[in-house]
Amino acid sequence: MISIVAHSLGGLVARYAIGRLYECGNRTKCSVGNNREQVECLEGLIAGLKPMNFITFASPHLGSSGNKQLPFLCGLPFLERRASETAHLIVGRTGKHLFLTDSDDGRRPLLLQMVQDHDDIKFRSGLRSFKRRVAYANANFDHMVGWRTSSIRRQHELPKHRLLVRDEKYPHIVHVDRGIMDRNETEVSANLCGPEEEMIRGLTQLQWERVDVSFQKSSQRLVAHNTIQVKSYWLNSDGADVINHMMDNFLI
């Protein structure tokens, strides 16, 4: 068996890698689309192993090009425009990928390709092969990755603050969505278009669990991007309950 746990850009790297490593297996029944229709599909393998958990922490699944997707720019349109124009000067090709400005050999931006099977790379099939797909997202104080992009949601789908209820066992987890989709919400967005909407529609053809995290009352909230995965225990120890939540729900 194989499970993948990734943080930040690692989530995008992992999605690309499983597309490359995916292998077709036996035929089985699987659910697709918003109505969870049962269809026959191939039970795939990743590098010859049975996929179980695909888990990301604060990963920019929708890139960084939308409003407030890169929070430290404060949602100011002129700064967000400049960032999309200059990101490649700071972080090279990664910047182009995140802002959807890459067009190698005239092809579509990589993140748009990665929401479906593309040529010989099975991006969607690779994701579908996992028993669980989970996106942990910071609801606030993450200055690097916005809430929408890390939780794969539209703006109006984000939980309202009054709905954020704390769990005594996991004090920094404020909302858990087990992946049951609201068809009314899908209909509301049916007429929307654009790259972000295309990525959301592509990724949500698969069921995702979404776990929203908030370090609002923590002294480590200003480093929430790293605290969510306890990058360094002495600096990010408040995120330990988030890691415990991941382990307690891990499929083996």
Image (cartoon, grey):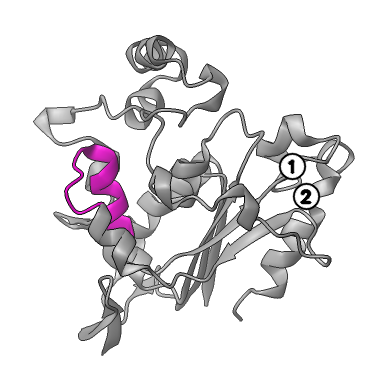
Q: Residue at x 39, y 15 (%)?
A: 77
Does residue 123 appear anywhere in the picture?
Answer: no
Q: Are marks 2 and 1 in contact (CB under 8 Å)?
A: yes
Binning the other alpha carbons within 10 Å of mark 2 as few (below 14), some (14 to 19) or many (20 upward) gives many
Does the magenta segment cover residue 195? yes
Does residue 21 appear anywhere in the picture?
Answer: yes
Q: Residue at x 28, y 47 (%)?
A: 199
Q: Residue at x 45, y 20 (%)?
A: 91
Query: Looking at the image, which residue sits at the far right?
Result: 234
Q: Amino acid at mark 1?
A: Thr
Q: Residue at x 46, y 40 (%)?
A: 60
Residue that label 1 marks: 227
Q: Which quadrant of the figure contains the C terminus?
A: bottom right
The image's mark for residue 177 is none
- Magenta part of the protein: which range? 189-205
Q: Secondary structure at mark 1?
A: helix
Q: Amino acid at mark 2?
A: Gly
Q: Is residue 176 left or right of residue 245?
A: left
Does the magenta segment cover residue 196? yes
Residue that label 2 marks: 239
